Amino acid sequence: MNYLNVRLVKSAVAGVLAGWLLASCSSGYSLAGVEGGRVAITDVYDRKPDAEALNILKPYQQKVDSIMSPIIGHSAKNLTAYRPESPLSNLMADVLRQAAVRAIGKPADVAVMNMGGIRNAMPEGEITFGTVYEIAPFENALCVLTMDGATLKELFGQIASVHGEGISGAALKIDGEGNLLEAKVNGQQIDAKKTYTVATIDYLAEGNDKMEAFRRASSKIFPKDALLRNLLLDYVKQCEQKGQFVTSQVEGRIKVSASN
């Protein structure tokens, strides 16, 4: 935890205590105004730590470390996320697609994971609880949707427009301008009238991150106790139990062709 966080926590504690004292005393005073200013955030806060604040936070830091430091698995290599396709985004999408089993009894036809939801890399070697929390810090949860092929192709067009997201079960060809040239699901051309199942996170299911096509899904299922972070934790633990390293690679799920 850096010094800035320490100062913020210390200030928050002081604020709560001050508020409690004011609320406990009927002084008759009222707030007349508030003044503020800007504070430059530089490495000076790291060079000059506040010993008193660090001592206040020490027992809490120890508790957090005891939770986050246990090793739950191992990664065969450094896995990162980047467009148009990456090892870590492929892995996250694969985890979502397989997790659809708990909602529909089988893997989804397609899975989509946004690059913006992957907040850190998975380093080579030991994987801890903290590693997974850094990768998936948000309270995003699994959502399984159904949509027709026309809507799915529209979704793929939106993914192409931002030059790629994490996908599983599908293969896209896009150009350098962000146009969708071709899309297949499980090696087959998309049937505009066929119904497809798509696994994603609840944040995207609401049409966020420029994936408006999700709003036109014909149905949505939100399985209980299916946070993305927990799904990834379970996957890592399962690999460890099998004596396997977590790994993933770029497979050509999204190929970029030269623009005409």
Image (cartoon, rainbow, N blue to C red):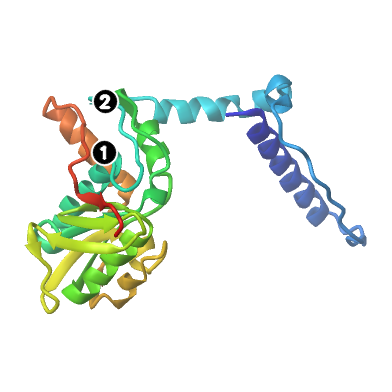
Could you tell me which residue is drawn at 90 percent across and 62 percent down? 30
Q: Is residue 189 above or below residue 244?
A: below
Towards the viewer: 37 or 234: 37
| Percent of width and height locating residue 173 | 22, 56
- Would residue 165 appear left or right of 101 to someone viewing this image? right
Q: Quadrant of the C terminus?
A: bottom left
Q: Is residue 245 above or below residue 113?
A: above
What residue is pinned by disc 2?
A: 77
What residue is pinned by disc 1?
A: 87
Could you tell me which residue is drawn at 21 percent across and 36 percent down? 249
- Place residue 127 in its image quadrant: top left
Count of marks, rendered view? 2
Could you tell me which residue is drawn at 73 percent across and 25 percent down? 44
| Percent of width and height locating residue 188 | 7, 62
Could you tell me which residue is drawn at 12 percent across and 61 percent down? 185
Can residue 223 be seen in this snapshot? no
Circle 2 — which element?
A: loop
Towards the viewer: 38 or 105: 38
| Percent of width and height locating residue 33 | 89, 60
Q: Say whether disc 2 or disc 1 marks the residue closer to the N-terminus.
A: 2
In the image, what residue type sits under mark 1? Pro
- Place residue 90 in its image quadrant: top left
In the image, what residue type sits under mark 2? Lys
Towards the viewer: 55 or 196: 196
